Amino acid sequence: MESPLSRSSTSSASSSIKSVPSSPASSNSSIKDIRLSRTATADALSASQCAALKELKSLCRAKNVFWNSGGDEGCTDEISHSRYLRARDFAPQAAFKQYDATVIWRRKLALDELYRTAEISHFEAIRRLMPQWTGRRSRTGVPIFVYSVSKTRPEDLLTTSKKDPSLSSVFLPAEYSTQFVQPLCARLHVDRVMPCSIFIIDLTGVGVRHFWNLRAHLQKASTMATAHYPESVDKIFLRYLVALPLTSLRATQILGAPSFFPVVWGYINKWFEPNLTSKISVLATSEAKAVLSTRIDLEDLPVSYGGTLPWEYGMCPNLDDEAREMVGSFADRWIEGPIRYVPRDDRDEIHAAGTEAKGLRRAVLAKLPACGA
């Protein structure tokens, strides 16, 4: 049977950030280009922001709070420190409080282990209900995800919630983004600042009953995402049939859209913090191409949204030429299930993860060219 991720799938379809210097962290906290890791840099940090970063790292070391369960301070911690500082306006104590809560949450769920050992078919069942990577990036290197809400059956999400009240498995696709997609795209874009994503959320065809049946699940998932995945969003585009943005999203007037849209927007404002809602734009179908093409080349924008990319919701990622050259033959033998980007001292690698009938998958799918090569 053909994989639902096949490029030939016929499923119904429907930022301004930059990528990665490969040099090690700088010890001079006053310079503008502080290197947080091999896959992220701080963007023109001021002296006070550099001091905040240093203080947060000191707090984590003093209290032994690290992302990795082994207590090692690694690349992921470096990226996370910056995310949480930005989310808390570079207030070290506030950032530490949120960061510490996330570390506790992740360890309680054993999220890293869950991602590495997830059963493939279960992972894919969850992934198909979530935003999916097109395989393309914006002009500034940000990966582009699409979420067609009308393709998500409320009963599937409700079944998932009943089987997994903690919603731990719901965050497997988020881990797919942060553990694989974002670092890969960061590696591909040489001026990258902070790994994040663009989301095109397609609300076309979504009725009030559909939304109402999803609201409890969406509220819980969005609340947890805001708390534990801060600053991972560059931009969100909500597509409706007809929309006329006024001076700000809070004053958006919807023309021709269902009358319940203000209710939807009301929930969005409750579920997300202001710094995230400020990144949301409402698009009419007629204006999608004009607006999206200001950030995304048409060859990287799916046909459904005015571009020329032959990708539909449910297909596997369709990598651009640069990415295909980077990952080699893996681009033509894409696999289902969890995938990890693994930094190495010489050549970074892409690893398979998850569990299949034969046991745990740990195959090296690609060895990337040496940094700077």
Image (cartoon, grey):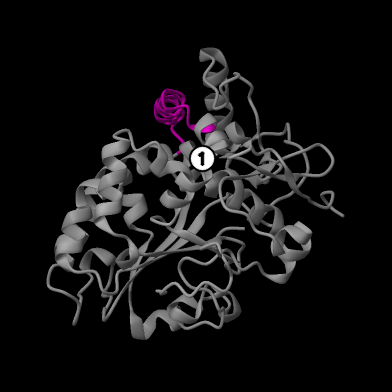
Answer whether residue 73 is magenta in the image: no
Task: Name the kind of residue labelled 1 in the image.
Answer: Glu
Drawn side of residue 261 relative to residue 167, left or right: left
Q: Viewer-proximal residue, 202 or 329? A: 329
Drawn side of residue 254 relative to residue 337, left or right: left
Number of marks in the rendered image: 1
Answer whether residue 93 is magenta in the image: yes
Drawn side of residue 188 relative to residue 101, left or right: right
Location of residue 212 in the rendering, given as x and y in whole percent from the top left corner: 16, 57
Q: Viewer-proximal residue, 239 or 98? A: 239
- Tell me the quarter of the picture where residue 253 sits: bottom left
Drawn side of residue 57 relative to residue 262, left or right: right
Q: Identify the residue at image location x=79%, y=51%.
A: 368
Q: Quadrant of the C terminus?
A: bottom right
Of helix, strand and loop, which mostly describes the magenta segment? Answer: helix
- Tell me the quarter of the picture where residue 322 sits: bottom right
Location of residue 71 in the rendering, given as x and y in whole percent from the top left corner: 59, 18
Q: Identify the residue at image location x=57%, y=60%.
A: 142
Q: In the rendered view, would you say 364 is above or below 287? A: above
Can the viewer see residue 153? yes
Q: Which residues are magenta?
A: 90-112
Q: Which residue is mark 1?
A: 119
Can the viewer see residue 88? no
- Tell me the quarter of the picture where residue 143 sits: bottom right
Helix, strand or loop at label 1? It is: loop
Q: Quadrant of the N terminus?
A: bottom right
- Residue lying farthest to the left in this orientation: 259
Q: In the rendered view, would you say 249 is above or below 162? A: below
Q: Viewer-proximal residue, 277 or 31? A: 277
Q: In the rendered view, would you say 284 is above or below 71? A: below
Location of residue 282 in the rendering, given as x and y in whole percent from the top left corner: 31, 71
